[in-house]
Amino acid sequence: LVESWSTNTLSQRLMSMMSTNLMCSKWMWPNESFLETLDNELGTIQNDLSTTRRIILESYHNAPQERSLIEERLTERRDRDAAIVSACTKLLPEIDGNTIDMIKSKSAFIELDCISPIPKGILRPNREHSLSKYLSAQIKRHLPAPVRDIETRAVRDDCDAALDTTNESWQEAQQNAQQSITQVIEQHTENLIWSDHKPIRATLDDTISLAAWNILERRPNGIHPVLPILTFVSEGSKEERRNSVTQLEHAMLHPPTVSAHAHAVVQWTLEALKTHDAVCLSEVGGPVVNALQKNTDLVVSISKHTENQSLNPSPAGTACEGRTAVVARNGQIFPDIPVMVGTKVRYLACLRLNGVFIVSVHVPRGGVNSRCPKAD
């Protein structure tokens, strides 16, 4: 939290550090009861929307337009399917007692291979049994009833894929659902601006007091790993966990929620500065940066965003900026301190106050058994 570049070591001068509920308001820590209620409400909206989609799609089943499309597709392939069934039926009796090379010289084989080339892997030596199974499967696949099932599914898949742009009832249902989702999220805004870390306090020589908080950056890569830890999420099935994480992530990244989070962080910072000389923030993103910089009476040291040097970086827009900040009423801003953490270069904000250099640190603590990369 604090680095002093004087002759005394940090351990000698750091008088106390507490992970107690330093100025914690109810919104600063996840309220699982409220979040579970939100998740259930969003899930109900999504389930209702899925039901509406299913009902609309089923209304097309066996309708004149669907039957016409299916018959059109059947007509296009009917002759070829019949020819494949005929050739396979002729060739099957020829397999017993013959080698692959002998079978390949049969007229039925040549006829079938011209209509539908036989996979070369089946024609390797001593694969007569595999060829027999292949021919039986082709007969079953190309009979009229299976073919009708295949083309019915294809027509319905096409209808499903085109529903978003062709069905006004579905478009209206989507718009109504999105409005409901937005309303539910905004009703729960206060329950969505929490962090997975609680603030801490440090005092140095009883002369400088600091507050620090990891505010949980509002980016997919910042939020996504945290949500599965919530009890009601972790106890669900795999599909339920995936749905809950998707819904809650969408709610926390809802633009008004992100703005409310930034505003809350600034208000907490201002309140902390009434009783502390400086505030250190970590996992700071663009919205919080912008909100802090609007307070022109503050001295705000904000680091550059984290640089990812991985060969496989995260998709654009998902990775965290990973900035840190030191905020005070006065002081002198100093250049960032770069730290290498695995494949990332993190920049730590630095501010000098009353002869003490304050650095907002955001690196893994990495004990002996930790899987976190060591910071150099």
Image: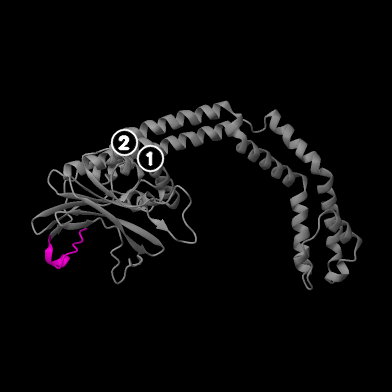
Question: Magenta: predominant secondary structure element?
Answer: loop
Q: CA distance from mark 2 to mark 1?
A: 9 Å
Indicate whether residue 5 is drawn in magenta.
Answer: yes
Question: x, y percentage for residue 66?
Answer: 69, 33
Q: Position of residue 145 (x, y in %)?
A: 74, 44
* SS at mark 1 in the image: helix
* Rendered location of residue 295, percent (x, y): 24, 38
Q: Tag 2: residue type?
A: His
Q: Which type of secondary structure does the marked residue at label 2 adopt?
A: loop
Q: Which residue is mark 1?
A: 251
Q: Which residue is mark 2?
A: 188
Foreground residue among 48 and 372: 372
Q: Residue at x 65, y 38 (%)?
A: 158
Circles 2 and 1: CB atoms closer than 8 Å: yes
Quadrant where the C terminus sits is: bottom left
Q: Which residues are magenta?
A: 1-15
Q: Badge 2: few (under 14), some or many (20 or more) residues near its Cα, within 10 Å?
A: some
Instruction: Let me know if residue 166 is in the magenta part.
Output: no
The residue at 85%/63% (across/down) is 93
Locate residue 317 relative to residue 34 in the image: left or right.
Answer: right
Where is residue 32 drawn, in percent x and y? 29, 45
Q: Is residue 295 left or right of residue 44?
A: left
Does residue 176 appear in this view?
yes
Front residue of this view, candidates 10 and 62: 10
In this picture, residue 181 sits left or right of residue 190: right
Report the amino acid beneath label 1.
Ala
Q: Could you tell me which residue is drawn at 20 percent across and 54 percent down?
A: 352
Q: Quadrant of the N terminus?
A: bottom left
**Residue 100 sits above or below residue 137 on the image:** below
